[in-house]
Amino acid sequence: MKIGRVIMEKMILSVPVIGLIGLLFAVFLRLHVIKQDPGNDRMREIADAIAEGARAFMTSEYRVLIIFVAVLFVVIGLGTRSWTTAICFLVGSAFSTIAGYLGMSVAIRANCRTANAARTSGMSRALSVAFSGGSVMGMAVVGLGLLGVGTLFLITKNVEVLAGFSLGASSIALFARVGGGIYTKAADVGADLVGKVEAGIPEDDPRNPAVIADNVG
């Protein structure tokens, strides 16, 4: 029994360590993506416009989510009479926000680099850049999740309070997913109605501002 308990304790201690390793790998992939050639001036101009729109969208969305998180923090604390669970909810929300921001910051840099790699080096190189860019978000989610769950359990020694962490992380992810979907669909419809129907601009033409907003979503 003692040997099994020692092994279990070491396994629990390894959880946040594995999370940190995942985050370090995400940083490595991010640096790898940024080192790639972003392309010519026109490609950089379009990428900068998408990046500017993405930052504006994330800022507006997170302002609303701060209010939601604050209200739910109080509700959870008073409703469960466990402010530890409420604090875990805040930590989960913060980690999910960080993961979303990291994914967005890499995505807006990987798009033009992927297009340029396809233009200059072929589809194999483009797939490598795109896969590395997408992997940053995946590794950030896994790394932050393991780091948060492992650390909070080591501190509280209570499995039940981890429900607060899960609720916070999933709530932010849900709002980001649904909000981004609504945003991109609204921009897509606007681009079709105004650009294609009224102005006669081809679909997905960067001269149409709604196309930039569509890519932001």
Image (cartoon, rainbow, N blue to C red):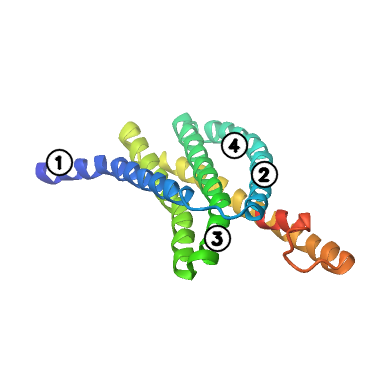
| Viewport quadrant of the N terminus | top left
Q: Which residue is mark 3?
A: 116
Q: What's the residue type where badge 1 is placed?
A: Val
Q: Nearer the viewer, mark 3 or mark 1?
A: 3
Q: Nearer the viewer, mark 1 or mark 2?
A: 2
Count residues near mark 3 (Cα–Cα under 10 Å), then give few for <14, some for 14-19, many for 20+.
many
Q: Which residue is mark 2?
A: 52
Determine the CA span between mark 3 and mark 4.
40 Å
Q: Secondary structure at mark 4?
A: helix
Mark earlier in primary sequence (1, 2):
1
- The residue at the point 70 percent across, 58 percent down is 214
- The residue at the point 36 percent across, 43 percent down is 24
- The residue at the point 37 percent across, 36 percent down is 152
Q: Secondary structure at mark 1?
A: helix
Q: Nearer the viewer, mark 2 or mark 3?
A: 3
Is residue 125 found left or right of 156 in the rendered image? right
Q: What's the residue type where badge 4 is placed?
A: Val
| Viewport quadrant of the C terminus | bottom right
Q: Measuring from the top left, give residue 124's x and y in whole percent.
A: 44, 69
Q: Measuring from the top left, give residue 98's x and y in whole percent.
A: 51, 40
Determine the CA span between mark 4 and mark 1.
38 Å
Q: Which residue is mark 1?
A: 6
Q: Secondary structure at mark 2?
A: helix
Q: Nearer the viewer, mark 2 or mark 4?
A: 2
Is residue 135 found left or right of 186 in the rendered image? left
Q: Which mark is residue 69?
A: 4
